[in-house]
Every structure is written in structure tokens, then in C-alpha cells.
Amino acid sequence: MSTVSERLRTLQRQIGRAADQPPALGLRNELRRLMRRRERSSFVPLPAPAGVEIAPGLRLVEQCFPTDALALRSVRLPWGDPIDVDRQRLVCFDTETTGLAGGVGTKAFMIGTACWRDGTIVTRQLYLTALAGEARMLDVFADTLPSDPVFVSYNGRSYDTPLLKGRYRLHRQLHPFEDRPHVDLLYPTRRAYRGVWENCRLQTIERNLLGIVRDDDLPGSEAPAAWLAFLRGQSSRNLARVLDHNRQDVITLTCLLDRLSGDVAAQDAHPPVSTAPERILREVREQVPLSP
């Protein structure tokens, strides 16, 4: 028996606890030590890479870009509906999320939109600088939509929309997608170009069909790590690149919609497809410089 007691005391000494110290007391001391360490550590949040704060933990980046396509007030949707749609009803949107698996644990930390307003394309990007801002972000996204929106996305029917619907439900809010038309450009793109190029990813289509080549683009798969690095106070540079990536995505949707609509006049009204999105992206970079 004494041998067993000696062995227990030896093990206790090895893990750094006095032999005569009760386990509960040792746990309390350990918690106090960790709390003191936490108090000593001074966490200073990084400045956000762009935009203005419109609510605690939520920022907005808004840009306006002139476009000749506004000479045509309506557009023919690529699903073959003979009725043209007023451009000002269209909402091209894309999200950046904490993962691709979906489910309750995945959330959107950025929602980008591109809309036509009075001779310009207006891009709006809502992004979180703290987890507490998610409910307000969803609220603002819904409140700023047109009264009768037509959503335009790329794989949004399968991913972005179900994800956002789930987040609205978790926050006990009504989502804005109920009974609203949704044009997912992935499907007409696949019908037209499956097998023509190596895949139908948006970057592949914009490079081969629209002539857009992105410079220093951060892959979407790296967006979650960039946002987490910002929240942990490590760096904001890659979060700025995520904003750049998301903005280009929604601008590309505006050009791709015209290209797929089959409306030759609309295509002619755009500046050459190889330069229009790049010109817009260059202007964005000048107005929203990357953080150091």
C-alpha cells in the first residue's frame, strides 16, 4: 500500500502538483494563473482594411462605377423568358464564408452585391469585424434590396442562398429570398461551355470568355484564414485581398449576365469585355488601397 502511495506522490510531483495539495485546490490555482496571464496579455484589434463602420462589428465598402450598358434599361435573362427585366431590379451577389462544407457551423462573414443605379454599377460589401455583427449584417442586406429584386449569382442556388437562409433562421429573421426570382448563371454557363474549357469555375469563365485576368488574386479557399487572421490581430492585408476578390466576382457577374443573355446590343454597349472589368478593378484598387 505504501508503495502505491509513494508512486502517486511521485506522479503528482512530476505533473507539478504538491503531494499534499487537494485536486480541487490545484485546479483553482491553475485557473487563477491562467486568468492572470490573460489579464497581462494586451490584445489590440487591428484597424479594418476598408470601409466605414455602420454598426458594432460591421463595416460597409461602397463604390460606384459608370457603365455604358445603362443605355439599355432592360436585359433578357438567360433562362429564355421572353420578358425583359429592368436592370435596376437585378442584384448580383456573392458571399465569402468560413468554410465550404455548409451547415450550422458555417457563416458568411462578407456579402457583396452589384446593382445598377442611375447610370452606374454600385458595389456594396458588408463584412464582419466581430462575430457580434452578423445579425445586423443580415438585416442591412435585406433592407437595402430593391422592392422587387431579381437575384443573380454563380452557384448561389446551391450554396450562397441556402447558407444565408440558415443564418437568417438562426437569428430569427425573415430571409429576403422567399418567392423571388433567382438567376444562377452557373447553369446556362455549363450548358453553353461544358467541355470547352477545363472547368466552369467563375475565374475560368471570366478568363476565357470575358478576357479578364486577375492580378494578385487571393483564392476563395484562403478567405476563411484571412478573416480569422484579422480577428486574431495578426494581419489585415489578406482581408483586403478578400474584399478585392469578392468585388471582382460581383462585377464579373454583371458582364457575364449580358454575355449570356444573347442581347447583342447589350454586349456592344459595354466597353470591350477584355478591359471593362479590369478598368473597374483598377479604379477600385486606387480608391481602396491594400493595407500594409
Image (tube, helix red, strand yellow):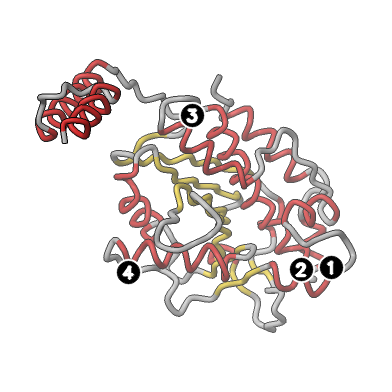
Label drawn at residue 49: 3
Tell me which numbered mark, 3 or 4, is placed earlier along the sequence: 3
Tell me which numbered mark, 1 or 4, is placed earlier along the sequence: 4
Q: Amino acid at mark 3?
A: Pro
Q: Of 69 and 109, which appears nearest the observer? A: 109
Q: Dots 1 and 4: beta carbons under 8 Å?
A: no
Q: Dots 1 and 2: beta carbons under 8 Å?
A: yes
Tell me which numbered mark, 3 or 2, is placed earlier along the sequence: 3
State which quarter of the image contains the N terminus. top left
Q: Is 278 left or right of 46, judged from the image as shown?
A: right
Disc 4 designates what residue? Answer: 174
Q: Residue at x 63, y 31 (%)?
A: 285
The CA distance from mark 3 to mark 1 is: 37 Å
Q: Is 222 left or right of 57, judged from the image as shown?
A: right
Residue 81 drawn above or below residue 138 = below
The CA distance from mark 3 to mark 2 is: 34 Å
Label drawn at residue 193: 1
Q: Residue at x 27, y 65 (%)?
A: 172
Label drawn at residue 189: 2
Tell me which numbered mark, 3 or 1, is placed earlier along the sequence: 3
Tell me which numbered mark, 2 or 4, is placed earlier along the sequence: 4
Q: Position of residue 218 (x, y in %)?
A: 65, 38
Q: Position of residue 56 (x, y in %)?
A: 29, 39
Q: Dots 3 and 1: beta carbons under 8 Å?
A: no
Q: Residues within 10 Å of mark 3 (few under 14, many from 20)?
A: many
Q: Amino acid at mark 2?
A: Thr
- Within the image, what quadrant is residue 240 found in? top right
